[in-house]
Image (tube, helix red, strand yellow):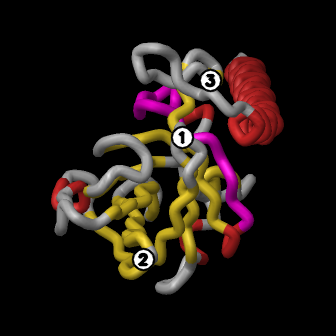
Amino acid sequence: MKNKSKLLFYKIFLAILLLAFVITIVLIVKKYGTQELYEEKNEEIVEVFSQTEDKIDEHGLSIIEFEGFKVIGIIKIPAIDLEYPILEQTTDDSMNVSISRYWGGNINEYGNVSLAGHNNKITLTMFGKNKNLKIGDRIFLTDLTGRTIEYNIYDSFITDPDDVSILRTTDESVREVTLITCTNGRANRLIHKAREIK
């Protein structure tokens, strides 16, 4: 009787293990399938943004939206083959869609604008290749007026998630951009800071 109970227990355990494995695979496929869909849509939004001359409504707000979020600019980093729309605000939902403004004013305003993006290590999308950036690499930001400004990376470091000093503006008369993404299994933040090339 004990052997039959043990055998039944093992069969149930294996069935649960198999079910958990199948569910995990389905969730992984769904997650990366959704990311692939967003990647295609990101390319379309970059194209729309580039071809739309009047991007601002009568209230000065962007008329271009992506998945319910206003697009306020485009980020391009040739060194890692990155080009994405910049969404107006950082939320859990916006972070799943594209790069987003975490802190600061409008794109290409004086001061520091901080942009956040997921570190998608498997698909190498969004800020998944930021670890390959070097001092001197260029970042191009295009704003709602269609103006593109070139920035030069001058600092890269890893910090704690609670470090708000990265958001400070060192000089209000200079345009700066700070790129923020997770690293070390979300325990830390990988930061790249860049200034406008005059």
Q: Residues within 10 Å of mark 2 (few under 14, many from 20)?
A: few
Q: CA distance from mark 2 to mark 3?
A: 29 Å
Residue at 71% over, 23% down: 16
The amino acid marked with disc number 2 is: Lys
What residue is disc 2 on? Answer: 198
What secondary structure is found at the residue carrying circle 3?
A: loop
Q: Is residue 113 above or below residue 72?
A: below
Which region shows up in magenta? 81-94
Q: CA distance from mark 2 to mark 1?
A: 19 Å
What residue is disc 3 on? Answer: 64
The amino acid marked with disc number 3 is: Ile
Of residues 14 and 182, the one nearer the viewer is 182
Judged left or right of residue 185, residue 83 is: right
The N terminus - image quarter: top right
Q: Residues within 10 Å of mark 3 (few under 14, many from 20)?
A: many
Of residues 177 and 161, the one nearer the viewer is 177
Query: First in sequence: mark 2 or mark 3?
Result: 3
Query: First in sequence: mark 2 or mark 1?
Result: 1
Q: Position of residue 196 (x, y in %)?
A: 41, 70
Of residues 17 and 175, the one nearer the viewer is 175
Which quadrant holds residue 89? top left
Judged left or right of residue 14, residue 139 is: left
